[in-house]
Each structure stands twice: as C-alpha cells, then as structure tokens.
Image (tube, rainbow, N blue to C red):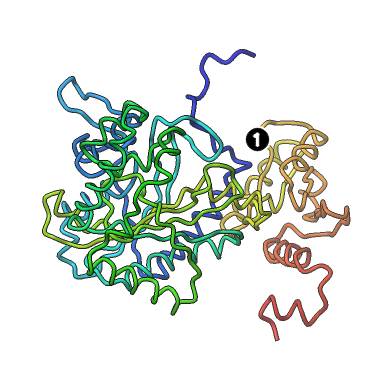
Amino acid sequence: MALITKRPKGTFDIVPSEAYRWHTVEKIVSETAEQYGFREIRIPTFEDTGLFVRSVGETTDVVQKEMYTVSAGGKSNFTLRPEGTAGTMRAVLENGILNEGFPQKVYYILSCFRHENVQKGRQREFHQFGCEMVGTESPRADAEVISLAKSVLDRAGVRNIELNINSIGCPKCRAEYHKALKEFFSARKDELCHTCGERLEKNPMRILDCKSEICQEIGKDAPLIIDYLCDDCREHFEQLQKNLQVMGIEYKINPKIVRGLDYYTRTVFEFVTTDIGAQGTVCGGGRYDGLIEQLGGPKTPALGFAMGLERLIITMKNQGCDFMEEKTCDLYIASMGEAAAAKAMALTMQLRDEGFFVEYDLVERGIKPQMKYADKIGAKFVMVLGDNEIETGDARLKNMADGSQTDIKLDDSFTDNFSNALVAEMFKGLDDEMVSLFSGKE
C-alpha cells in the first residue's frame, strides 16, 4: 500500500500504544504545578507575528530562521507559537490577571513549532510544559520555580540530571558586557557565520548561542557575563544560591548559559542530562523582568521555565522509569446469536455505568475470532453468552491470565460478583493482611 501523503518532517504521531506515556508525564507535571499553587492557562496556537519579534528578539535564531508565519487573507501575519511565554504574558495582560494580586502563577501544556534541523529530541512540532510566575523580583521566587522543575523531574524518576545556573544581568550591566563582547568578536569578525556577523552590532550575546561549530569554537574564550554584573544583580545571584542551598538543591554555576531568547534577564538555568545525546537540555528558564513592560503592560517582574515533554519521555524511557500502566479491558463479552448479542450489549452498558472497561462484539464474528480479539486487546476476563446462558441465567467467567473459570449469575448480583472477581485477581498472591491493607478492610 502506497500512502498518498505522509506526516511532515519533524512531526510525529502519538499512537494509542504510546499515549499512556504522555498521560503519565501530563499527570505528573499538572499535579506538581498545582501543588505549588500554579493554575492552568490555555492560549491560542498562533499569535500576531509582532508578539514574537518584539519579545523573543529579532536577532534570535527562532525569529530569523525557525518561525512558521502565514498570512490570513493577504493582510495580517500570524505565527504558530515557537514558545509559550510570550503568548502567556500577552494573555495575562489582556485578561486582567495582573489585577488579581501578586504573585500570579500559571502553567500550561502546549505544542510549539520551529523549523529546526530534525534530530533526536529536536522536532519541528514539539510539546512543552511551562510555568510562569508574575509579580515578584525576590530571589526566593527564582529558587521556588527551580524547585518546581526539580520536583517534576524527581517525581518522574529521572536520574543523572544536573542543574546549571547563571546570571545574565540587567540592561545596565549588560550594556558593559556587550561592549566587551563586541571588542572580542570584532577581532575575528571575518570568521563568524553570516548571521553572527549581523548580530555583532545588534546583539553580540546571541553569538554565544549560535549553533555553528565555528562560532561556538570562537566563543569558547569570550568574556563571561558573570564578571560584568552590577552590584544588584550580583547580590540577587548570591541570594539565589543561598536559597537553593536552604532547599537542598545541588547546582553548578555555568557562566556560559545565556538561553536562546532575548527577553531573559538576571537568572537563567537549565536542567541537563547526558542520556539523550546532544539535545540534553530537558528544562530551561529564568527571569524576564522587562517582558511585560515591553508588551505594553506596567513594569512587572516575572520568571518561569519550559520543559520539553518529548525529551522528558525519552529520558524516562532510556532510564527505565515507571509509566502508568496502559488501561486494558476488564471484561470482553462474547456472544452467539441475536438474543445473546442484545444481552451482551445490556450487560456491557450496566458495567460501564459502574466504571468498568467492557467490550463486546461489534463486527458480528464467530466465537473463535471473538476470543482471539479478546486476547489481542488484553482482556482480563472473558464471558461467553449463548442461548443456554440466556435461558439458565448462568454464565462462566474465564480468567485470561490463568485460564480458571468461575460461574456467575446474570441477575441483579452480576455487577457485584464481577467486581469481586476482578478484585480477587488484583490481590492474587497477597496474604490476607496485605489484602485488608490495600482494600481498606479491617
């Protein structure tokens, strides 16, 4: 069979056999965020292009090379979101959330789009869990956000994750740093890639984030922002470190972290693993104290992070972390004849109303194919209905794990009896004391 079309490069399908992994991480991130007092926010998939040019930065790779921008009716330009912070801050401003008291704390789970060079852990459509905190400039807030990210990774069970932190200062101290960078890179201007040659005048810090191997090699000996911090930024960074120590969070100062987007100020951080190859940053974030004002709002400090869900899942799989078990059918009711099929349908609805996962024949197959199907879908129990079972009101419940069979009545006690059989299978192998403990019975 030749498909007419295939999925675009850099995208992937989350098929049913993989969906439970996503359910696991989505449950972990949302429950952890809510425990920290963050509330969910949902924003549009696309925004006015100007939002990203203004906030992310016109000299960044994201804006210059990676955005998916379309015209609507030939008049307006819209861009599929390349990240979540800009749209979230726009929504916070537009919906008056700043008037609800500080700090405001929101989280999101969304898809993002960038025209990237596709490799393991780097897709053109990818998914992020992000948290944003608005209205506090305290270093305690920085430590709190980092703690949240760490809690997610800990609950996911990942190991060998290293926290790297840095400070990239404020506009005041960054101006001095830009002068030092211009002087350093100007001496080797002819060796820089074309894009970085333009960045040299507009925003030399972006050269440090270039993916070109040549530019990366040149930048190894570049001045470090941490040596140019003003007194306030230095104090903020020192207080952050003290707060992390109080929380018992280990970290490493990495003076080369600048992050890839222009809105960052002061604290920047990354959680990095070596388990997924070159794309080892599982989570990254920091402060963006000027972003809300830049978008037309009042001067308001803010900070946050984004965590790549694909990279988190890859890391969890590589490390053998636990995922939720995929839900499987509790009972498959096979039937022979019209009367039995009707009874199977009625019993199925009865059990589903009580919360059980039940299936019955929808393809009008014989008993043998029905039994094969029940085995394929991993049904825990199978019950066969025919004219004899309908007449006597008794059927046999087959345990697919060990082949044992139990008589079961098709009367008002059916639901309770099936429930008891399912519970007995769950607790098989445990002694009476353990069964009582898990079932809550004394």
Q: Is residue 418 above or below residue 398?
A: below
Q: Is residue 156 above or below residue 279?
A: below
Q: Which residue is drawn at the image coordinates 28% and 53% (left, top)?
A: 264
Query: Residue 401 or 217: which is nearer the viewer?
Result: 217
Q: Is residue 343 above or below residue 442?
A: above
Residue 335 placement (x, y as % from top left): 75, 41
Q: Which residue is drawn at the image coordinates 61% and 53% (left, top)?
A: 316
From the viewer's perspective, is 348 left or right of 95? right
Can the viewer see residue 94?
A: yes
Query: Residue 296 or 388: which is nearer the viewer?
Result: 296
Q: Which residue is drawn at the image coordinates 71% and 51% (left, top)?
A: 331
Residue type, mark 1 in image: Leu
Residue 314 placement (x, y as % from top left): 59, 46
Q: Quadrant of the C terminus?
A: bottom right
From the viewer's perspective, is 341 left or right of 167? right
From the viewer's perspective, is 196 left or right of 413? left
Residue lying at the far front of the rendered structure: 187
Q: Which residue is drawn at the image coordinates 23% and 53% (left, top)?
A: 174
Can the viewer see residue 347?
A: no
Q: How many marks?
A: 1
Q: Quadrant of the N terminus?
A: top right
Residue lying at the far bottom of the rendered structure: 442
User: Helix, strand, or loop for circle 1?
Assistant: loop
Residue 145 placement (x, y as % from top left): 38, 65
Residue 362 placement (x, y as % from top left): 65, 35
Which of the 4 image quadrants contains residue 113?
top left
Q: Which residue is mark 1?
A: 362
Q: Tell me if mark 1 has few (under 14), some (14-19) or many (20+) residues whose alpha carbon lies within 10 angstroms of its own.
A: few
